[in-house]
Amino acid sequence: MGIETFWDNIEAAQAEAAAAGELFDEVLVEQLASTPRQEILEYAERFDALHDALYRWDVWAAAYLIGGGCSDDSFIDFRAGVIALGRQWYDRVNAAPDSLAAHPAVVRSANVRDRCEALFYEDVNYAPSRAFQRITGDADAFYEAWREFRGTDAASINVTDMGEDFDFDDANEMSRRLPGLAVLFLEANS
């Protein structure tokens, strides 16, 4: 699936969810379930590539500030949440994670001193498998098709350059690297 088609799917699901007052992930699952299985697998492949591209220390640091901490599992959900924001925000975050300081949900969460749930969106990770299950009635159908699609029985292990590691608990370092988010989440709490 090409990048344009992927983002068209995300943006169509956003628009439909907003218009119908439904959850984005539910609309996305429904949308994927209406496509051929091959397209669901191609969507999953593109999603994984975009998700993996955000697997960096600077993005994790942004998630850490916004979430008041961020475990490995939460970081998976955060990256899915960034994808769910759509192409414009994804591109901004990928280029400069501190740009999230301007996102309305992030600003709101900083003002109420609450974790920004909109950006930790676990269910988006499972949209392809849930679409397959909706089509087949089999919870394992996606994973069987995925192994065949990828041509391997083992999960591939990608070694990613995450950039320079740094101490997320060092307020000075976080302020230097993510000044906008630090103002919202560190200075407001001091």
Image: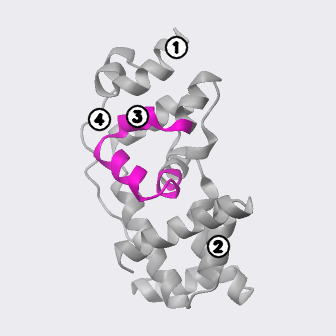
- Mark 1 neighbour density, 10 Å: few (under 14) some (14–19) many (20 or more): few
Q: Residue at x 38, y 62 (%)?
A: 50
Range drawn in magenta: 80-104
Q: Of all residues shown, which one is farthest toward the top?
A: 190
Is residue 61 highlighted in magenta?
Answer: no
Position of residue 151 in the picture relative to residue 41 (left or right): left
Separation of disc 3 and disc 4 at Cα?
10 Å
Q: According to the image, label 2 marks what residue?
A: 29
Count neighbours of disc 4 (C-alpha within 10 A) and say few if under 14, some if 14 to 19, many if 20 or more: few
Residues under labels 1 and 4: Cα distance?
Answer: 25 Å
Label 3 vs label 4, nearer the camera:
3
Residue 188: mark in rendering = 1
The amino acid type found where label 4 is placed reads Asp
Q: Nearer the viewer, mark 3 or mark 1?
A: 1
Q: In the rendered structure, which amino acid carries the disc numbered 1?
A: Ala
Colour convention: one colour
What is the secondary structure assignment of the residue under circle 3?
A: helix
Marks 2 and 4, how far apart at CA: 35 Å
Instruction: Where is residue 52? Give x, y as percent.
Output: 37, 59
Mark 3 vs 1: CB contact within 8 A:
no
Distance of label 2 from label 3 (alpha carbons): 30 Å
Residue located beneath label 4 in the image: 165
Q: Which residue is depicted at the point 44% across and 81% down?
A: 42
Crowding around mark 3 (Cα neighbors within 10 Å: few <14, some 14 to 19, many 20+) is many
Q: Residue 69, can we see it? A: no
